[in-house]
Amino acid sequence: MSTTAADIPASSRVHYLNVNYGIKSWLLTTDHKRIALLYLASITLMFFVGGAFAVLMRIHLISPQGTLVQPETYNKLFTMHGVIMIFFFLIPSIPAVLGNFLVPMMIGARDLAFPRINLLSWYLYIIGAAISMYAILAGGVDTGWTFYTPYSTTYSNTYVIPTILGAFVAGFSSILTGLNFIVTIHKMRAPGLTWFRMPLFLWAMYATSIIMILGTPVVAITLSLVAIERVLHVGIFDPALGGDPLLFQHLFWFYSHPAVYIMILPGMGVVSEVITCFSRKRIFGYTFVAFSSLAIAVLGFLVWGHHMFVTGQSIYAGLIFSVLSFMVAIPSAIKVFNWTATLYKGSISYSAPMLYAFGFIGLFTMGGLTGLFLASLATDVHLNGTYFIVAHFHYIMVGGAVMAYLGGIHFWWPKITGRLYPDTWARFAALVIFIGFNLTFFPQFMLGYLGMPRRYAVYPDEFQVLNVMSSAGASILGVGYLIPLIYLIWSMRYGPVASANPWGAKGLEWETPSPPPTENFEETPRVTRGAYAYAGEEDAHD
Amino acid sequence: MTEMAHSATRAALRHHFDDLNQQHAAGTLGMWVFLVTEIMFFGGLFAAYAIYRSLYLTGFEAGSRLLDIKLGAINTAVLIASSLTMALAVHAAQTSSRKALIVFLILTMILGGVFLGIKYVEYHHKWETQLVPGLRFSPGTEIPQKISLAQVELFFCFYFFMTALHATHMVVGIGILAALVVMAARNRFSANYFAPVEVSGLYWHFVDIIWIFLFPLLYLIGGRY
Amino acid sequence: MMLLQGVPIHPEQGSTIAKDVDALHFFLTGITLFFTALIFAIILYFAVKYRRRSEAEQPTATKTFLSLELAWTLVPTLLCAIVFTWSSSLYFRNSRPPRASLEVFVIGKQWMWHLQHPEGPREINALHVPVGVPVKLTMTSEDVIHDFYVPAFRIKKDVLPGRYSSIWFQATKVGSYHFFCAQYCGAEHSMMIGWVEVMTPTDYEAWLAGGTKGESMAQSGERLFTQFGCATCHVPENTGKCPSLVGLFGKPVKLRDGRTLIADEAYIRQAIVQPNSMPLPGYAPVMPSFQGQINEEQVLQLIAYIKSLASQEKTQGK
């Protein structure tokens, strides 16, 4: 690396943040890095709105009769928590923020292939979010984020259509993001950057994008059929009018199961970057980790039926979906073992991103293994629709995806803002979140096994002890999420100025100044070796 | 001339691409990926259609018999012709013949307009004969008594949703063609730079192909022969 | 830990399958805890042993071992295969109701459970059954999708509108067990719960006798059969206008479009609600649809009556 603008302090240098000012320069930007920041601001807002609903739910559930609201309101709380967290936080989180910022930088490009489409996708997201917020403010929706028919088509008298419309529009935002990533990764890699030299984050983004473009349109059409049925009262899904309510579930889960992988695959990509950097090691088993992402993306499309084991689908369909679901566990296990093995004989630093990555690996392992209970037919019958499910997917999505998202935000924060955050606070917050998370969701595994159904506004007395524990954990978790919000905002102004590569990380994004110039690189970089070429490892091959 | 072509090339090249080849390849791949998304979009609908057709064969056949097969066939021919003119437009762009390009683009737009016009006539007729599900549905004596009206209504639900979705794509396509005509008039295309025409052509052909599937599924399944 | 006093490690084991399901559950719990602990332990061990001792420290390269990759691909594969086989055979076994079960009919509607015994007694949000006898529940919904869940019996099945689903259990202990609606169904979803009362056979007989003041389900069905005018056309001796229903239940029926269906509960329900959808050869489609005029409980009573006609034929045939 020659001496470049990297050594000139950010204040006296033109970069993407100070190249021009004013609201218009942000709202009309086509710079992928600015769009990433637009996403960061908007999804952070949605995260805290969705989180507020969760807090209200946990307060309500402290007492068996419910402490706070009527059952109708409670139903709206969990529905809106789900809709917001899934469609407006988890699905866009890592791809739209970190992916947007990093995909062009990691491949040595000046921007994504279609910058204006990228901006359009942010606007679609905002429009979708605005429509859903309208639905909330107008009175809310109570169908559950799964919109099961015929409840959603015929019986619910809440704001189903606006909510569906919001998710529909946001879906197109996600399709366009996926499209942009696929084309960019295919066509815009810097000279010398072959597929197997790419950082694993890019493999993860690529696999995620495939799911986004293949799955999202199916749920879009399914949700529009629900809306049509609601408006016209025709029997697409309502059996009273001749429809088939289970067809909805098939179409819905055909997308919504792969959507789980939209949430977790990017997190796996982040963890691969963080683990290697803070142990100064090449990833163990690069090709295995890369291909397991693709395997998860492909298999993810074949397992939707495991959400429907108790709907009365045939035993044989159940067997097939069960065996396929077990197969998804294998690439996930391969990843976990490879990350762990990467630490072997490394030089391990306990920086905040690394703590999040540790948390991710452990909690994802737990979340993944509890998935086996649900892939397995005999145990799923008992656990389906209980708090066990709730605990399982929160271990994957919060313990996994959110941990990875926070780890990634901390890891690339100096690159994004040009500032360092206070590391002690960051490590403290990571610890608080880890403890709060486990205290919130571990009791829910037990609740589910003991038989407490999910989506219950009131519950029998025998479940109270565990519910109180869960609510106590939630209060810790809530505080844990507020700490990073405070010190990260603080650091944007007062944090120490970051160098181009404060962690000693490898990867093209670290070879350009922090924050990067508008076109990312002064000249197109040439790549001569694989990712993770940490010292002493130049000659290591798979 | 070369000087001019050069500056035109430079104007067409967006800042983040290295050269026009890369830009062209990215644009084409982008459209293909988009079409994959579109296939999944219509695919979900086709899947739902297939399931209900197998469940409610008689109702779907009875519904299909109420469609105007002649208008459907004419529309099929119109769309195939428009695909031809679109292909000719792409060829004209590749060979830098601006006039031919504009003529073929406008012809394609006209054919698209004819399609939509005929579609409007069909929709209007359905409205008149009370075959619009949810809003105005009472087919009267045309449907044999033993056939469940709910099934026929479901057929029309699919008919309207699928054809309207397709027509929406046509409207978008005509809008894109109009933009291309303006760009062509401003001499933006040449043998060096015709990617927008080509990519829009892909889209147009795709929309035609969707119709090629819709026509038999909706109009021809009635088993009237 | 003190907090957890009184929290059981597993829900009450009240049915014949509960112990088997729990065994698998504990095996999976063992796997989960073992691997989670293993991964955390290795991370912790590496994190301490290979902690960065100086900023300039540069670790040496490690090669990827193919054998290691294969090992941690094959071990999970093998474990998954074991669990799949175990679980699927258990599920297969649990899915088949033993013959000669006691049958109870369940109707879910927003937001209560209606249960009816063939002998006549009806219950709301309660189910009385004898211990040690296989009980089959035939379930349907008046409105949205519900789900009948008895944690102590480890059974659960969605209850769908427009079709019948079934589930069975054999209680092993006298006592009261919660049942829940486990599929979100609207405002009072969480109040759609009740108790299974498992009784000794003698107590059950007494309870049944006490509840059988009115008519049995088949008798109610017979009354409806006349009330709805079915009896004027569906006469026992086939007149050619309508098929006779005597001996129909459980037999194959050939439809006009060539399909052959078994005349089970679902078939009869469909024939009542949407007769047009299943025209019979040799009969004009004159039967009106009873959709909207008849509720699910009445359909079940008619089915019970038609079923009783089948056994009548058997006794007559002797």
Image: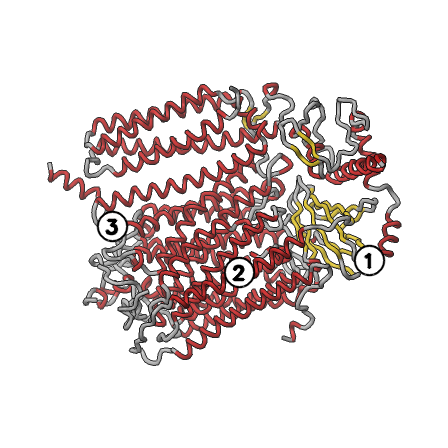
Q: CA distance from mark 2 to mark 3?
A: 48 Å
Q: What's the coloring here?
A: secondary structure
Name the one closer to the observer, A482 or A416: A416
Please name the residue that numbered disc 1 is placed on: C199
> Which residue occupies the foreground of this view, A86 or B104?
B104
Which amino acid, mark 2? Cys
Q: Which mark is residue A288?
A: none
Question: Closer to the camera: disc 1 or disc 2?
Answer: 2
Outermost front residue: C318
- Mark 2, mark 3: which one is toward the viewer? 2
Question: Earlier along the polypeptide chain: callout 1 or callout 2?
Answer: 2
* Image quadrant in which you'd find residue A513: bottom left
Q: Is residue C183 above or below residue C77?
A: above
Label 2 sits on a secondary structure element that is helix
The C terminus of chain A, quarter of image: bottom left
In this orientation, which residue lies closer to the viewer: A419 or A294?
A294
Residue B124 position, x and y percent, is 48, 22
User: Residue B16 has which mark?
Assistant: 3
Q: Circle 3 marks a residue in which chain?
A: B
Q: Which residue is mark 2?
A: C80
Observer able to see residue A456: yes
Q: Chain of mark 1?
A: C
User: Could you tell whether C64 is left or right of A68 in the image?
Assistant: left
Badge 3: residue crowd in 10 Å (few <14, some 14–19, many ≥20): some
Residue B174 at x, y percent in the picture: 34, 30
> In the rendered structure, are the residues bearing label 2 and label 3 in contact, judged by CB atoms less than 8 Å apart?
no
The answer to whether C137 is drawn above or below residue A94 in the figure is above
Residue type at mark 3: give it: His
Residue B85 vertical placement versus C76 (above, below): above
